[in-house]
C-alpha cells in the first residue's frame, strides 16, 4: 500500500520509505529536529532557537563565546611546592606543618626536618 505522507518540516509528500528527514535530504529538518548541539572544544551545550541552523550557531559560539583553553588540558597536578629552602619538590596535596602552618614535601613534613620556627618546641624524631 502506498500511503502518501507529508513531511512536517518541508511539507513535501513522500512514501513510507522516504519520509524520514535523512531519507529525502530535507532542507528544513533543522526546524523540527530538536537536538541540543554541544561545542566540540569546551563540551558546553549550545542553545539553538527554532529556525536557526545548529552549525552556524555552534560556529559563532566557537568564534566568540567559547571558554576552551588549550593550556588547561596540560594543567600541572603537582602544584604544592615545598617551603624548605633549597628543596624543589612539589606534592599533589598540601602537607601542612601543625606548628608553623607551612607547606612542605613528604620528606620535610616533620618540624625537625624543616627547621620549624613554630610556636612550640619541635618534638624529637623518636
Image (cartoon, helix red, strand yellow):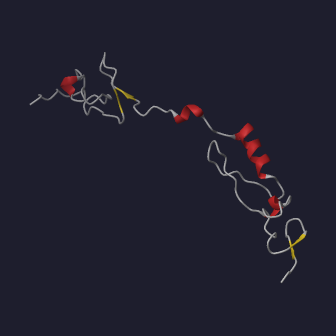
Question: In the rendered view of the protein, which quadrant contains the N terminus?
Answer: bottom right
**Where residue 91 sits in the image (x, y, percent)?**
34, 31
Q: Picture quarter containing residue 116?
A: top left
The quadrant where residue 64 appears: top right
In the image, 115 versus 9, the foreground residue is: 9
Describe residue 104's horizontal placement relative to residue 6 as left or right: left
Foreground residue among 31 and 88: 31
Find the residue positioned furthest to the left. 126
| Quarter of the image that includes the C terminus | top left
Q: Nearer the viewer, residue 98 or 35?
A: 35
The location of residue 10, given as percent across then percent down, is 88, 65
Task: Identify the residue at image location x=70%, y=51%.
Answer: 46
Query: Is 59 left or right of 9, judged from the image as shown?
Result: left
Q: Position of residue 18 (x, y in %)?
A: 81, 69
Q: Relative to 32, is 103 on the left or the right?
A: left
| The furthest residue to the top | 86
Relative to 21, residue 81 above or below: above
Q: Nearer the viewer, residue 59 or 103?
A: 59
Residue 4 locus on image (x, y percent): 88, 78
Q: Residue at x 49, y 33 (%)?
A: 75
Amino acid at each position: 500500500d502506498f500511503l502518501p505522507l507529508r513531511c512536517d518540516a518541508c511539507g513535501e509528500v513522500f512514501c513510507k520509505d522516504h519520509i524520514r528527514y535523512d531519507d529525502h535530504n530535507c532542507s528544513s529538518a533543522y526546524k523540527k529536529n530538536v537536538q541540543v548541539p554541544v561545542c566540540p572544544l569546551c563540551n558546553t551545550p549550545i542553545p539553538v532557537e527554532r529556525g536557526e541552523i545548529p552549525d552556524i550557531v555552534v560556529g559563532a559560539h566557537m568564534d566568540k563565546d567559547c571558554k576552551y583553553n588549550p593550556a588547561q588540558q596540560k594543567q600541572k597536578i603537582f602544584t604544592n611546592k615545598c617551603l624548605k629552602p633549597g628543596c624543589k619538590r612539589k606534592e599533589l596535596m598540601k602537607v601542612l606543618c601543625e606548628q608553623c602552618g607551612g607547606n612542605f614535601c613528604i620528606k620535610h613534613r616533620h618540624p625537625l626536618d624543616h627547621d620549624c620556627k613554630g610556636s612550640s618546641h619541635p618534638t624529637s624524631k623518636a
